Image (spheres, rainbow, N blue to C red):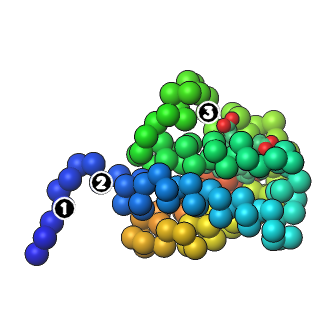
């Protein structure tokens, strides 16, 4: 039996590191752009999703235990506060969560427990950004 006692086995590394996080974000924004199910979510974003294709994977990488350059470039910036002025309702929050769940399933389905934990945590985060009502 082999065991991996490496303390550096973060979710970021287990899922495949920077290229995989970039691919998850690109798949997420491709879905947002192409699938009419996410039309409301798409409409809330700027015409050019290029900056988001850069910024989201860097945030997710740091959040998942990888390189923290997004956090270093944005000291003290809180993801919840950053979204509090956007008109996010339950439907748009669930569009975000569903598109992200599909992106993770398409691009990084293994290890399944890590992919599922990441999807669950991001779903909770998206849901908590929705305004009540
Ligand atoms: C709940 C549904 C969500 C909606 C409707 C939403 C919408 C938006 C919008 C409109 C922007 C501004 C970008 C633009 O105008 O193109 C933005 C920025 C951003 N969002 Fe979200 N978002 C949601 C959830 C999330 C979640 C759960 C995360 C992280 C896990 C996230 C990460 C980001 C990041 C990293 C930025 C860019 C911030 C920066 O680098 O300044 N969003 N979001």
- Quarter holding the N terminus is bottom left
Quadrant of the picture in which ligand 1 is shown: top right
Whether the residue under disc 2 has CB within 8 Å of ligand 1: no
Question: Residue 23 location, x and y as percent?
Answer: 57, 60
Q: Is residue 109 above or below residue 26?
A: below
Depth order, front residue of 99/18: 18
How far apart in space, not on screen, are marks 1 and 2 (Cα)? 9 Å
Q: Badge 3, how many Cα within 10 Å: few under 14, some, many 20+?
A: few
How far apart in space, not on screen, are marks 1 and 3 (Cα)? 33 Å
| Mark 1 or mark 3, earlier in chain | 1
Q: Residue at x 70, y 46 (%)?
A: 52
The residue that label 2 is drawn on is 9
Q: Residue at x 64, y 38 (%)?
A: 79
Q: Are marks 1 and 2 in contact (CB under 8 Å)?
A: yes
How far apart in space, not on screen, are marks 2 and 3 (Cα)? 25 Å
Question: Residue 122 location, x and y as percent?
Answer: 58, 56
Q: Residue at x 56, y 54 (%)?
A: 22
Q: Is residue 109 above or below residue 24?
A: below
| Mark 1 or mark 2, earlier in chain | 1
| Mark 2 or mark 3, earlier in chain | 2
The residue that label 1 is drawn on is 4
| SS of the residue under disc 1 | loop
Count of marks placed on residues = 3
Which image quarter: residue 76?
top right
Q: Is residue 11 visible?
A: no
Depth order, front residue of 113/70: 70
Question: Residue 86 location, x and y as percent?
Answer: 82, 41
Q: Nearer the viewer, mark 2 or mark 3?
A: 2
The residue that label 3 is drawn on is 78
Which image quarter: residue 95?
bottom right
């Amino acid at each position: 039996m082999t065991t991996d006692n490496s303390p550096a086995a973060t979710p970021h590394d287990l899922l495949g590191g920077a290229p995989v996080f970039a691919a998850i974000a690109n798949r997420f924004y491709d879905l947002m752009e192409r699938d009419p199910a996410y039309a409301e979510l798409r409409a809330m974003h700027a015409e050019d999703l290029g900056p988001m294709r850069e910024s989201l994977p860097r945030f997710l990488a740091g959040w998942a235990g990888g390189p923290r350059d997004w956090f270093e470039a944005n000291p003290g910036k809180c993801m919840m506060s950053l979204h509090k002025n956007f008109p996010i309702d339950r439907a748009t929050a669930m569009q975000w969560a569903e598109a992200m769940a599909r992106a993770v399933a398409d691009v990084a389905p293994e290890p399944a427990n890590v992919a599922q934990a990441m999807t669950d945590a991001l779903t909770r985060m998206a849901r908590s950004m929705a305004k009540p009502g």
